[in-house]
Structures are given as structure tokens and as C-alpha cells.
Image: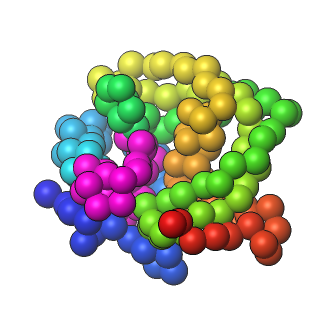
Amino acid sequence: MKGLKDLLLLGNPLLYTVSEPILETDLPKVSDWVNDLHHVMKEIRAKYHFGRAIAAPQLGNMKRLIYMNIDKPVVFINPEFIFLSEEKFEVWDDCMCFPNLLVKVKRHKELIVSYKDETWQSREWKMKDDLAELLQHEYDHLDGILCTMRAIDDKSFKWRI
């Protein structure tokens, strides 16, 4: 099982790599991958007191997989945005790969995401505000994009206190 020591940190070249889609034949591996993501997110929460979702590339697994656990666990396999609102909002974004740094970014206020769940069923979810922001952050990881690359300007960085 992977742990906090396996979390890739800012500067690791893998974080800037586009992830591969998960194939239906990969499905037997997904539960192990999700267990790793859950375990690392639990460790992040214990150490840094934040963390609502994590993407597989953050653990060096270059697959299009996101694990979110707010009220209950949700697994996003091969997510795709099918709608992004024109309206955006500013938010101080954080990331497990650089836990003490906050980055001010603009995110779409609303979205609709299409994805497969852990049973390979097609799903859609309309999100807004903080959930929409969260999923956009994790989705960026699948495309090798970090919030540092989306900073509004060169003054959009601050340390978490």
C-alpha cells in the first residue's frame, strides 16, 4: 500500500505528464489504486488538516483516475468535462504535492462531468462552487497541469499559516 512517502512533490517531472485513459481491462486494478489514494489522503488529512480529493498521478500512477471523499467516496474513471460555465471565480487553491503553498487561481463556477464509476457504469454530475473548483484542480493533474501554472499573476502565491 502506498503512503505519504509515495506522494510526488512539486518539481517531479511525472506531475507534468498527461495521464493515460483507464481501459475496462484495467478494472480489476482500480480498487487497489483507490485504496492507495484513500490511504494517502487520510495521511495528508492527519498531517496537514486538508484534503478532499486526490488524483492518481499524484502517486505516480499515470492513469485518469480521481478519488474524492467528502461525505462518501466517489471514484471518477476517465472523467471528461461536458460543460464548463463561462462564469469564473477566484480561489486560493492548495495541493497535496506542495501542502504549505496556496495559489490564487480562477476556476469555472459550474461544470458537468461525465465519467465511469468503479463498476464501469457511466455517470454525470453537475457541480458548482467549491466542488467544481475541486474537481477542476484534480482534473488538471490528469493533464499534467498544476495550480502553480494557473496562477492569476506573479503575486498569487502565499504560505499556508
Query: Which residue occupies 64% across, 70% down?
Result: 158
Q: Which of these two is toward me, 121 or 36?
A: 36
Query: Which residue occupies 55% across, 20% down?
Result: 125
Q: Is residue 25 magenta?
A: no
Q: Position of residue 69 (x, y in %)?
A: 36, 35
The quadrant where residue 59 appears: bottom left
Query: Which residue occupies 48% across, 38% down?
Result: 78
* Image vertical order of residue 66 relative to residue 3, above or below: above
Regarding residue 18, the answer to whether it shows in the image is no
Regarding residue 137, the answer to whether it shows in the image is yes
* Image vertical order of residue 46 relative to residue 86, above or below: below
Query: Which residue occupies 27% across, 36% down?
Result: 27
| Residue sitting farthest toward the left | 1
The colour scheme used to paint the residues is: rainbow
The magenta span reads 41-67
Q: Position of residue 75 (x, y in %)?
A: 37, 33
* Image vertical order of residue 151 relative to residue 28, above or below: below
Q: Is residue 64 magenta?
A: yes
